[in-house]
Image (cartoon, grey):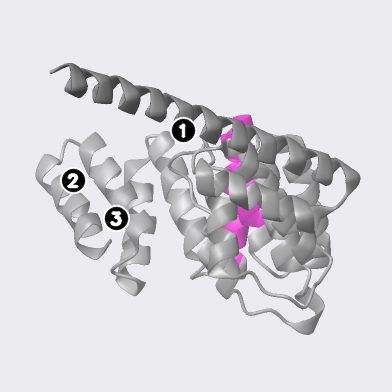
Amino acid sequence: MKMTKSIHVLVVLLMFFVGKVGANTVEQYLQQAEAKFKRGDLESAAVLYQKVIKLDENNLTARKKLAAILIQAKMKDPESEYSGADLAVIQEATPIHPLPHYHFSLIDLANITLSPNDKHLKHESLRALTQLRQGDHDSAIQTANALKRKSPDHPVAHNLLGLAWVAKGDINQARNHFEKALSLKEDFYAARINLANLEIQAKNYSKARLNLDKVIASDKNNRQAHLSLAKLSDLEGKTKESKHWVRQVSQHY
């Protein structure tokens, strides 16, 4: 009995010690990474931030700094492409908390077909999106406006401007930009879903449904459209239909 109790105490002490060492290691890696980052040694900092995330996957400081390094690295190399892993790191690091129902798909961004004159578009779009995710709405508007001047015929800048104006509470400005994005590219689903969500917010339910139906007609498995239709149906009191769209989301994802 005494032996069992002694072993139990030893295990508890060992777990405490291991946990303390792990915490110290995370803190040490993070301090080293921050020092490297401040000195401009981004490659070394990225390695250290990755070690922090491996030990503590919920460490938001490390995730945000690693996302920032990825964005800076890609902007220095306009010919490079974002990998799925890069986009996942950036998206996980910077959720858009003020805009939970609005949509700017990083997959859409990755799959945009660009002309030689538009190679900057992905990098500048991601910069504006990151500013928006971090709550710096005015900087996001400046970046998106600069992007619009460089690529006036592409819908991405207007979609970003729409998101920024939603965040600032100007629904009319936001609607104008989403509609302008769709006038440039009718099947730009991110803008159409955002316009629908805007109409849901404004309680223009028939307009919202019209836009979401257009998305589903062309892309029946669009997860964002399913989520918006579930919310819209619930607000309209159509409980059975709302559950149908929720099931669609779970079936496809």
| Front residue (pair 6, 178) | 6
Please tell me whether the stretch drawn in magenta is mainly helix, strand or loop: helix
- State which region is magenta: 158-183
| Front residue (pair 242, 11) | 11
Q: According to the image, label 1 marks what residue?
A: 18
The relative height of residue 76 versus residue 61 in the rendered view (above or below) is below
Residue shown at 62% from the left, 58% from the top:
180
Residue 164 is left or right of residue 111, and the answer is right
Question: What kind of element bears circle 2?
Answer: helix
Kindly tell me whether residue 127 is visible in this rendering: no
From the image, which quarter does the N terminus lie in? top left
Q: According to the image, label 2 marks what residue?
A: 242
Q: Which comes before the other along the chain, label 2 or label 3? A: 3
* Distance in Å between CA atoms under marks 2 and 1: 48 Å
Q: Residues within 10 Å of mark 1 (few under 14, many from 20)?
A: few
The relative height of residue 19 versus residue 34 in the rendered view (above or below) is above
Residue 133 is situated, as x and y percent measured from the top left of the image, at: 61, 41
From the image, which quarter does the C terminus lie in? bottom left
Rendered image: mark on residue 226: 3
Q: Residue furthest bottom?
A: 116
